[in-house]
């Protein structure tokens, strides 16, 4: 049984609490100002239209099988749709839990050394995890996996140090790994990371014998983890239909350099501090790539020079983790080109591996040159924290304006405010702007999918005298036809087309095709139901007293449409003065 250091006591515990508080304040404020984006909208719409079944939970989503994510989406879509305050709180809570786990791990590995406070700050403040944190879908890819990985590592270290029952620790490790896999398949990286940690902790052996010692000591654990990972991957292969990432050798090399040299490396040292946005990712300036690369190489050199007995294994484990992470990216996305290598969604999990591996390198090392007085040590640590904090602030300042999704919040707010002003409005359905949801998802980028879950329960494409079209900023505007084909003059000079009982053909001046808006102008002395039809398509509306107009959505029917069939219910005569078909005018 080890004598575990109380993690939150003393000056270092207070410093750790200060690091965590800074993280909570900064990320809490940034999360409060962010909003849903892209995948969040259409995934919520899909969940809202689905029943909570096994088929839904284990459905193939763009090559992913992630039942816990699907469950979270379903619960939010049905109980708290687009409640950003709830989502932001949940993201921050998981981020906090992961940060606490990092501190517990660092305390077990480094004891009372001040270096654990610096490493905690690197994990808590690094902007490399900021972009996924501000985006719900990406946060679900990142934080559950990282938290499960950290819990599994903590349990392994705890077990290795003689704390707790072996069966309890092993069961917890397997459950944490399985939970991570059910959130996202990237959690397969937990298994090799655990093996690397076990090898680095195998101090009873030296050199390559560490591998044998780690494998033998935890042999039943590795068998259980291997079974869980292989079983998951087998189910994943059966349920998904996605082919490999493709891409040429040149593309894979471009992705690899972008991922390692321009994404992971600058991200670990608080970058990128300068750059430009390209395709939804930040391309760091050349000087940022050079400086951050030199800093990372300098840190690795220092760890290899002054680190403990497992320093080489610590570096090897981190390099292996980055290579494995990159291999996952290349296997699924390399055809996208170098831009995909810059996406922090695919690199942000390397941060926890970097901090963990740095601690493995430092564990058991001799004291580094440092001030002898308490005040001097405090100033040195404070200087390191300040330097990394300044770097992280610069990186955060570059990323936040690009990824806080302020425009999405404004669009949805304008849409909901317009609905609240007149709940009887009907919205003409159509594709959302690509800034909100990309057209790559097909019909899932339509307003009816995106906004269907809203508690205002907006109506789409129903017959209405209050048909509205969505403006560029999300505001609803009265429908108008930009160009249209009208009906021929009706047979009655005073009534146009008289509807009483039975169908009446209304001929258009020219044939039309495609999905269009129909505007029907009429007058009547009493309410009655009017039927509108073309071929197999039919719709009804209630004709109200007096002169009125009603809007209907004509679907994209096979062939040209040259006439509209109207019919009354015999209650009273409805005089139709005009039928016009056309596209809505952009507001």
Image (tube, rainbow, N blue to C red):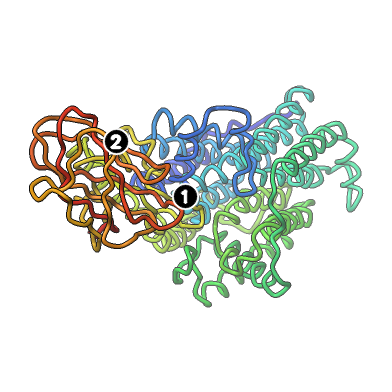
Q: Is residue 369 above or below residue 50?
A: below
Circles 1 and 2, Cβ within 8 Å, touching? The answer is no
Disc on res. 443: 1
In the picture provided, is 208 more to the left or to the right than 409? right
Q: Nearer the viewer, residue 256 or 470?
A: 470
Q: Where does residue 365 sit, x and y in percent of width and height?
A: 72, 51
Q: Is residue 447 above or below residue 90?
A: below
Q: Where does residue 137 sit, x and y in percent of width and height?
A: 50, 45
Looking at the rendered image, the disc whose residue lies closer to the viewer, 1 or 2, is 2
Q: Where does residue 561 sit, x and y in percent of width and height?
A: 37, 55
| Quarter of the figure with residue 454 | top left
Helix, strand or loop at label 2? It is strand
Q: Is residue 42 above or below residue 301?
A: above
Question: Residue drawn 64% across and 63% down?
Answer: 299
Disc on res. 540: 2
Disc on res. 201: none
In the picture provided, is 287 more to the left or to the right than 249? left
All told, the count of numbered labels is 2
Badge 1: residue crowd in 10 Å (few <14, some 14–19, many ≥20): some
Q: Where does residue 39 sit, x and y in percent of width and height?
A: 48, 48
Q: Which quarter of the rendering shows the N terminus?
A: top right
Question: Residue drawn 75% across and 33% down?
Answer: 161
Badge 2: residue crowd in 10 Å (few <14, some 14–19, many ≥20): some
Question: Residue drawn 91% across and 44% down?
Answer: 212
């Amino acid at each position: 049984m080890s004598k575990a250091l109380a993690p939150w006591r003393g000056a270092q515990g207070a410093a750790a609490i200060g690091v965590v508080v800074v993280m909570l304040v900064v990320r809490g404020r940034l999360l409060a100002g962010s909003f849903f984006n892209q995948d969040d909208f259409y995934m919520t719409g899909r969940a809202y239209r689905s029943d909570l079944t096994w088929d839904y939970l284990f459905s193939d989503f763009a090559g992913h099988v992630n039942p816990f994510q699907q469950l979270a989406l379903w619960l939010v879509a049905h109980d708290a749709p687009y409640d950003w305050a709830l989502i932001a709180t949940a993201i921050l809570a998981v981020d906090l839990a992961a940060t606490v786990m990092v501190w517990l791990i660092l305390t077990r590995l480094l004891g009372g050394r001040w270096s654990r406070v610096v490493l905690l700050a690197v994990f808590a403040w690094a902007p490399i995890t900021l972009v996924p944190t501000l985006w719900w879908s990406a946060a679900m890819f990142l934080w559950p996996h990282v938290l499960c990985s950290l819990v599994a590592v903590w349990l392994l270290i705890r077990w290795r140090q003689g704390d707790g029952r072996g069966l309890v620790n092993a069961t917890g490790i397997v459950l944490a790994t399985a939970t991570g896999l059910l959130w996202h398949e990237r959690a397969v990286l937990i298994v090799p990371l655990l093996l690397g940690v076990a090898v680095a902790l195998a101090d009873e052996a030296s050199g390559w014998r560490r591998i044998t010692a780690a494998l033998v000591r935890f042999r039943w654990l590795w068998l259980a983890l291997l079974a869980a990972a292989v079983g998951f991957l087998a189910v994943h292969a059966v349920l998904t239909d996605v082919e490999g990432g493709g891409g040429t050798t040149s593309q894979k090399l471009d992705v690899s350099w972008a991922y390692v040299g321009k994404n992971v490396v600058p991200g670990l040292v608080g970058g990128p501090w300068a750059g430009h946005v390209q395709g939804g990712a930040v391309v760091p300036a050349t000087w940022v790539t050079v400086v951050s690369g030199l800093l990372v190489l300098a840190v690795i050199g220092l760890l290899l020079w002054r680190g403990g007995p497992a320093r080489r294994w610590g570096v090897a484990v981190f390099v292996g983790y980055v290579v494995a992470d990159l291999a996952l990216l290349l296997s699924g996305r390399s055809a996208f080109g170098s831009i995909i290598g810059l996406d922090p969604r695919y690199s942000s999990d390397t941060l926890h591996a970097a901090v963990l591996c740095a601690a493995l390198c430092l564990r058991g090392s001799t004291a580094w040159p440092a001030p002898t007085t308490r005040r001097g040590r405090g100033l040195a640590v404070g200087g390191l924290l300040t330097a990394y904090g300044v770097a992280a602030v610069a990186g955060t300042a570059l990323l936040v304006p690009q990824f806080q999704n302020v425009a999405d919040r404004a669009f949805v707010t304008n849409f909901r405010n317009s609905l609240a002003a007149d709940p009887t409005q009907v919205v003409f359905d159509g594709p959302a702007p690509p800034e909100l949801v990309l057209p790559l998802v097909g019909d899932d980028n339509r307003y009816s999918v995106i906004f269907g879950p809203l508690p205002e329960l907006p109506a789409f494409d129903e017959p209405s005298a209050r048909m509205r079209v969505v403006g560029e900023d999300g505001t609803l505007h009265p429908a108008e036809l930009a160009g249209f084909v009208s009906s021929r003059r009706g047979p009655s000079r005073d009534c146009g087309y008289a509807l009483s009982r039975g169908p009446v053909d209304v001929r258009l001046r020219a044939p039309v095709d495609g999905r269009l808006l129909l505007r029907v102008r009429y007058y009547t002395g009493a309410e009655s139901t009017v039927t509108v039809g073309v071929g197999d398509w039919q719709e009804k509306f209630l004709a109200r007293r007096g002169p009125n107009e009603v809007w209907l959505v004509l679907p994209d029917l096979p062939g040209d449409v040259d006439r509209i069939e109207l019919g009354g219910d015999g209650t009273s005569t409805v005089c139709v003065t005009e039928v016009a078909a056309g596209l809505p005018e952009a507001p």
